[in-house]
Image (cartoon, coloured by chain):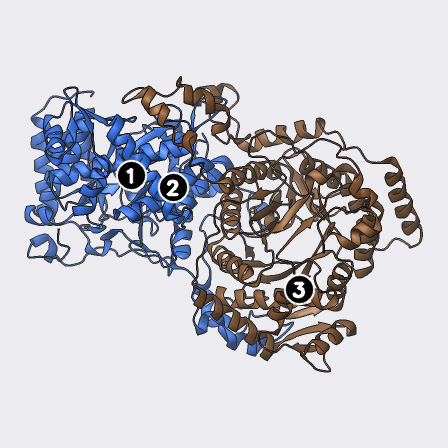
Chain colours: A blue, B brown
Amino acid sequence: MSDARDKDPAARRPRRGPRVRATHPAATSFITRTIPPYEMLSEDLLATIEEQSDLILEEIGLEIRGDADALGLWRAAGADVDAAGRVRVPRGLARAIVRRSAPATFTQHARNPARNVTIGGRSTVFAPAYGSPFVSDLDGGRRYATLADFHNFVKLAYLSPWLHHSGGTVCEPTDLPVNKRHFDMLHAHMTLSDKPFMGSVTTAPRAADSIEMCRILFGAEFVDRHCVILGNVNVNSPLVLDGEASRVIRTYAAANQAPVCVPFILGGAMGPVTTAGGLAQCFAEAVFCVALGQLERPGSPAILGNFLSSMSLRSGAPTFGTPEPALAYFAIGQLARRLGVPLRCGGNLCGSKLPDAQAASESANSLWPAFMAGANFVLHAAGWLEAGLVMSYEKFVMDLDQCGAFHVIGAGLSLDENGFALDAFREVGPGKHFLGSAHTLRNYETAFFDAELADNNSFEQWAQEGAHDIVWRANRRWRTMLEAYQPPPLDPVVGAALRDFIDERKAGMPDAGY
Amino acid sequence: MSDARDKDPAARRPRRGPRVRATHPAATSFITRTIPPYEMLSEDLLATIEEQSDLILEEIGLEIRGDADALGLWRAAGADVDAAGRVRVPRGLARAIVRRSAPATFTQHARNPARNVTIGGRSTVFAPAYGSPFVSDLDGGRRYATLADFHNFVKLAYLSPWLHHSGGTVCEPTDLPVNKRHFDMLHAHMTLSDKPFMGSVTTAPRAADSIEMCRILFGAEFVDRHCVILGNVNVNSPLVLDGEASRVIRTYAAANQAPVCVPFILGGAMGPVTTAGGLAQCFAEAVFCVALGQLERPGSPAILGNFLSSMSLRSGAPTFGTPEPALAYFAIGQLARRLGVPLRCGGNLCGSKLPDAQAASESANSLWPAFMAGANFVLHAAGWLEAGLVMSYEKFVMDLDQCGAFHVIGAGLSLDENGFALDAFREVGPGKHFLGSAHTLRNYETAFFDAELADNNSFEQWAQEGAHDIVWRANRRWRTMLEAYQPPPLDPVVGAALRDFIDERKAGMPDAGY
């Protein structure tokens, strides 16, 4: 695929709408890390994990259930495919297929080119949480999500300088028929935001609809040559890829769009209870899916995903922000770099029912290793609560601050003359303070990241102002943000074409709850 | 110094009292990291920081105010000392002094040898927060700390498997005269706990009292040959070491005990507003102090400290858990390793007034980089609230869970046959679950870290149980812990000798409020 803009009308459209809101000098359309990723394991140990992963693919294999074309692709590639749909892949083959043609880095284009994101290499892209049936906020409590909520979260993600991506199913619009939700979700991403987004993955025809809408937004020729949409596809771990999932992967790949291939492994249930085993399985399943996309269309973009969760010994419930997935992140980051494909990790994951300190600790314990592992696409970077069942308005804006901080960490230390400030030491000397020094005045405003929701006032002032916790401030914050929302301009011809497409497709099918 | 136990009576005393409470297989008397520290900067850039630090020491220098002996030591070592007490150190000299004799690793002995901690190298030791005038809890709110609070926190630290150290001034016993507090604080550490501890640093005679009490507890000969106490000494940044602080450093060093040398730099006030400058200053000041200890007694143990905080642009207040100190931690971790001395970092630091999500995010954003930087001694690992003004009972036990998690992260991945679980894949195969597999049953109980205060029950069950947040659970937790407290046994002869010493010393001086 080529990233050079071509003669497609969408590409020639001038830059419009608000640029990334520069609330901080660190705000950028995506993070380009100048600090290296954390290298936890030696090359020897990484090779050992690859071998274990190969062993799983060769000896146990994956089952593809009900997609003869996918089985045919694997058979043609040299895998052993039996009558039950079990695909046993000779060791090294899946990784070789990926290495041969999958791009290490690609651009996902946004309708506003200033919002384009690079996925892979030293870049990190933050996207909102995905897939929750519920929403919650301080006033309204926990309730089923609606399209109105969906709109709100697309707007909030658009307004934040710290999210680079509009995400996908930011919450389930449960007030719409299941078989038509994707139209309204895509329409919201395309019209209420100008950041890049994700499409439907629940069935192959819905994936195709999503891509078709992109052709209207970007132009068909442009879409065939550039990545404009991601599809987040879960493996039915352990070791099963149902036919719908494999067709969705192939649908995105065939259109030169990027499937995000994500084994979903709750250790002890969908995978072994030991982290190394879950890691080897996760890598095997993800590589298998990325390879399938390459077999469908060599050179199409893809992201290697992983979702490894631990389990509470007391309740058997999935747990998040625990140390075992952190270690797995570090390892899979290294494996993805060895393989040469972009990596997805989960962001601010947590199990807490409330946006309290449990939620914040767990989230940080997930985002830190994701970032240090070198994750290129961080899904669930904002809003995730209650093991993903809930998209929380307050948690969303609290997480934004955390995403913001990683812009500064990713940028690293400025070790230049101004950074070292020798002139300040010369001016100030021992025992004096730097507050009024020329160096301080020159650098004060850009020196420190200031989390919007952190209260650092004195105890007395804070008490006088009501002694509020961060959730209270977060509640005011997201309401203020929504009040200030203005949609980015959209070519009315494109807007009408999208509307017509949706109306026609909806009219052509009865409502369905599946 | 020698770590071999010798013929001192204290060394021959049999192991007594409860061992580290094994609530989790990861619980150990200190963490030995099998994962490598994070290497952010190249050797070239580290050398650049050392050069800047040397430049500060050579051109600006440090002032020692009112300690002629310290000035004499520096003059004899080759520094330029002027009449005003300004010490200008030829470039490279301070680091050379440290390299020549400071131990890279040493053992701090506890009165229960099972609690001995290794400080340096791949070890990490967690100690409680230090120095707050206030305490708070959910029921009693925020109030001045008393000796009863001090006792409570020593007990809680003793009871936790995740803290390896009893700390020092875990809170200020403000109900006691300032000049006599150290006796009661040391007595609490020595009698209510059997973990290693820290001594007084407010004046040199109080430091000497602290060491004298150790001689009663451990035996004088043992103390002269082994590290049994740490003293946390702050530099009067920028670039001033007051005579009391320099005498305290020399008092600990002369007794072969370990000063923790900690520049306290709020960027923009006590140092430049840019991180690189604060880092170079911090390193210069800390190396200067560690070197002073070596000049006093070559080979005595020491810890290189740092306390770099950022500032709120809105209020000018110090901020914690922000990205700039995180970057500084990574760099200073590398600098300490190059120098070959143990490193102290701050742990769960935060600015929040409440143990809410602000506190938890900030704390994690401080503990993560401290741990990944390879910090050997993590002060403020539990309880710190409100920029250190408050020791919070609930935050204390919440932080314990976070310290626990790093035991698992530090232990790294088990990449052995059991870890890879190939037998489980063979048993289970595609599409089945691992819950009942032999591998799961064999590993279930030790597989995952379970944070005590995390609630991972279903929403319904959690709601039925009262829909509590983590602070509520933390409140129950510390109360339950204190109820279960039993003091570790102490030789009654030693106990009486300590009591006699304190009574005599207290009787010999009038109460004073300074």
- On the same chain: label 2 and label 3? no
Residue A195: percent from left, percent from top? 24, 48
Observer-nearest of B447 and B57: B447
Q: Quadrant of the C terminus of chain A?
A: top left
Compute the Cα span from label 2 to label 1: 10 Å
Q: Chain of mark 1?
A: A
Point 8% across, 27% down: residue:
A507
Q: Which residue is mark 3?
A: B101
Element marked by disc 2:
helix
Q: Which residue is mark 2?
A: A329
Residue A128: percent from left, percent from top? 32, 41
Point 68% across, 36% down: residue:
B156
Q: Chain of mark 3?
A: B
Q: Residues within 10 Å of mark 1 (few under 14, many from 20)?
A: many
Compute the Cα span from label 2 to label 3: 40 Å
Q: Can you see residue A96?
A: yes
Q: Can you see residue A478?
A: no
Point 39% across, 57% down: residue:
A35
Compute the Cα span from label 1 to label 3: 50 Å
Q: Of the residues under marks 2 and 1, which one precedes in the sequence?
A: 1
**Mark 2 and 1 residues: CB-CB less than 8 Å, in contact?**
no
Is B204 on the left-hand or right-hand side of A239? Answer: right
Residue A93: percent from left, percent from top? 20, 38
Residue B310: percent from left, percent from top? 52, 59
Q: Amino acid at mark 2?
A: Tyr
- Residue A190, located in which quarter of the rendered image? top left
- Is B366 above or below relative to B405? below
Label placed on residue A305: 1
- Residue A166, located in which quarter of the rendered image? top left
Element marked by disc 1:
loop
Q: Amino acid at mark 1?
A: Gly
Is A265 on the left-hand or right-hand side of A460? Answer: left
